[in-house]
Amino acid sequence: MKYSLFLLSALIVFCSKAQFSVSVGPSMIKSFGISGIFPGFHVGGEYAKDDQSSLFARVSFMPSKQNTPETGFMIATGKTFDVNPYSIQLESTEKINYTAIEIGRRYYFGNGLDYGFGFFGGSNLCFVFNKVKYEVQDFDENNYDLFINAEQISDRDKAIGNIFGFSFGLNAGIKNNFTFGTLYLDGGMNYAIYALPSNTIASTSTMYRQLFFSVNIGIKKDFY
């Protein structure tokens, strides 16, 4: 998260000699095929190329969403053959979060970027970081070893992995300028063309999806 904010700060500094804006507000992500939504927030910066187009960057963070417990996903086996029963099934709960870094281009229709009511749309590149964590029910760790996809986990509190993804997307929205700033609503769709799990734990995630949708509401303040 701190690296995402650093990149956003760098964009704002770069734009400080031209018209730029800073935005903030609530966000949500809906992963295709996953029930419920991932609520969160975003901060962004936008650099005006002219009255009808801009470059933008946005960082969104969605805290962990919890899946329903799935019995039998985790297997623990005895440290010795004397343990009875030798193999046990454990109830586990998967959690995953989203940190998304978007960069892209917007085109404005209607009254333009900094005046009145209008529409906008464009495309983006999105770097997505997911943290995957499994919470496993208590068991006798002195007599059993925990395994995930045949890989031994030394500590059930360390059943954590990460997924890095790279996606392309489209977005569109509406905005209206007021004296205090600009209110906006936008939505988008992204599809990950590349995803790299950090370990076996991340690769077993049942909540990661390549296709996801996002909605953002916020206020934007222009600087000249």
Image (tube, rainbow, N blue to C red):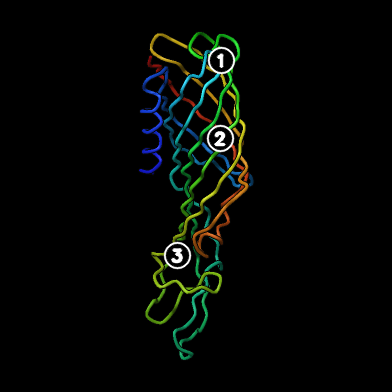
Give coordinates of residue 73: x percent, y percent: 55, 66
**Residue that appears at 41% across and 82% down:** 143
Q: Is residue 20 above or below residue 135?
A: above
In front of the other: 9 or 142: 9
Q: Secondary structure at mark 3?
A: strand
Circle 2: residue type:
Ser
**Residue that appears at 39% across and 28% down:** 14
* Dot 2 crowding, Cα within 10 Å, few <14, some 14–19, many 20+: some
- Give me the disc on residue 136: 3
To which residue does mark 2 refer? 214
Kindly indicate whether the residue at mark 2 contacts the one at mark 1 (C-beta within 8 angstroms).
no
- Give me the disc on residue 147: none
Quarter residue 59 falls in? top left
Give coordinates of residue 100: x percent, y percent: 49, 41
Q: Is residue 18 above or below residue 156?
A: above
Kindly indicate whether the residue at mark 1 contacts the one at mark 3 (C-beta within 8 angstroms).
no
Q: Earlier in the sequence, mark 3 or mark 2?
A: 3
* Dot 3 crowding, Cα within 10 Å, few <14, some 14–19, many 20+: some
- Give me the disc on residue 52: 1
Q: Is residue 206 left or right of residue 27?
A: right
**Residue that appears at 56% across and 15% down:** 52
Q: Earlier in the sequence, mark 1 or mark 2?
A: 1
**Whole-number angstrom distance, CA of label 3 to CA of label 1:** 52 Å
